[in-house]
Amino acid sequence: MRLIKFFSILLVGFLLLPNAFAAQTKGKILVLLSSENTLALKEGKTYSTGYYLNEFGVPADRFLKAGYEIVLATPKGNAPSVDQSSIDPAYFGGSTDEMKRIQGVVASLADIQHPLALDKVLAGNLGQYAAIFMPGGHAPLIDLANNPKVGKLLAYFHTANKPTAAICHGPITLLSAQDDPQAFEAGMVAGKPVAASHWIYQGYRMTIFSTPEEEFFESTLKGAKVRYYPAAALKAAGGNTEFAEMWKSHVVVDRELITGQNPFSDQALAQAMLEALAAK
């Protein structure tokens, strides 16, 4: 009888373990990634893209080690694509081993193949998330910057004053949080004067992949051109943009907003996010 009781207690203990570990997490960080991987360029040309491995994986690794849970989401709820050009030791201090380790971190995320769909995130309890993070790669230009539903999501974190971080091309996503992000994008593509209406980040200090860096990227496209420069778009919308030299780590923090300029800002951005979360 005592043996049966012992095993019953042991079984209950095992069943409670997952809840015990969950209770030990510091909170959930929502990571918003693009559903798409084909960027439209001028003259009908395209570029295969996705998220940048280090811009996603390095901060995610830091967040996990600090005790936070990562929850992934894409507009369609499909698995995000990695930009193949980002699978390069150059973005990991020249270390192939570190690059492979971060690849393993990303692959090990429970929902990497089955992220939440944006509609499901919006219909759920947004209060469960301590912060939101948007990695770069050119993919956010495709379906995040012009997406009113993304704007609704960002408006929650803005109103709740919860850390909102984005790196490299990720800050272009901020443009979704205005009255008509699609019209604003159309104006930028057409090269016409545009103005953001009721943009929640009006006047914020911020950074993004700089125009000189984007021009360097264009030089690799064999004559193809991007439809508009992200740095110019943020400035046109009313962002107070700041930049460091090309390829230098640079992070700007203004209120709840944390932005990093380029892939080499990954560690600094992760640190700024963790400090913002700790301050909460």
Image (tube, helix red, strand yellow):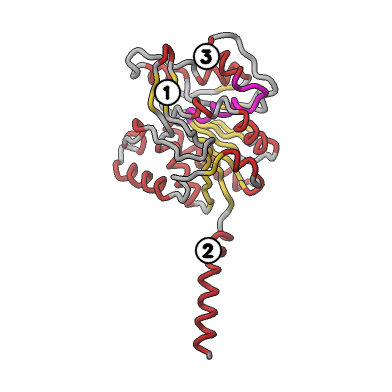
Circle 2 — which element? helix
Identify the magenta region: 168-182
Q: Is residue 174 magenta?
A: yes
Q: Which label's residue is closer to the chain start, 2 or 3? A: 2
Picture layout, residue 90 above or below residue 59:
above
- Give the residue type that dot 1 points to: Met
Judge by depth and name the residue closer to the eye, 133 or 280: 133
Spatial distance from mark 2 to mark 3, Cα to Cα? Answer: 49 Å
* Closer to viewer: mark 2 or mark 1: 2
Sequence-earlier tag: 2 or 1 = 2
- Residue 75 against residue 43 in the figure, above or below: below
Closer to the observer: label 1 or label 3?
A: 3
Dot 3 lies on which element?
helix
Residue 67, percent from left and from top: 52, 54
Residue at 33% across, 34% down = 90
Instruction: Confirm whether the magenta stretch covers residue 240.
Output: no
Vertically, is 40 above or below 66? above
Q: Which residue is disc 2 drawn over? A: 18
* In this rendering, position of residue 57 left or right of residue 133: left
Residue underneath mark 3: 189
Q: Which residue is mark 1?
A: 246
Q: Nearer the viewer, residue 184 or 278?
A: 184
Q: Nearest the camera: 83 or 280?
A: 83
Q: Residue at x 55, y 74 (%)?
A: 12
Residue 222 relative to residue 117: left or right: left
In the rendering, at what x and y percent does residue 43 appear? 42, 11
Report if the CB atoms under discs 2 and 1 are less than 8 Å apart.
no
**Marks 1 and 3, Cα distance to the nearest angstrom?**
24 Å
Where is residue 102 drawn, in percent x and y?
38, 45
Q: Is residue 215 above or below residue 253?
A: above
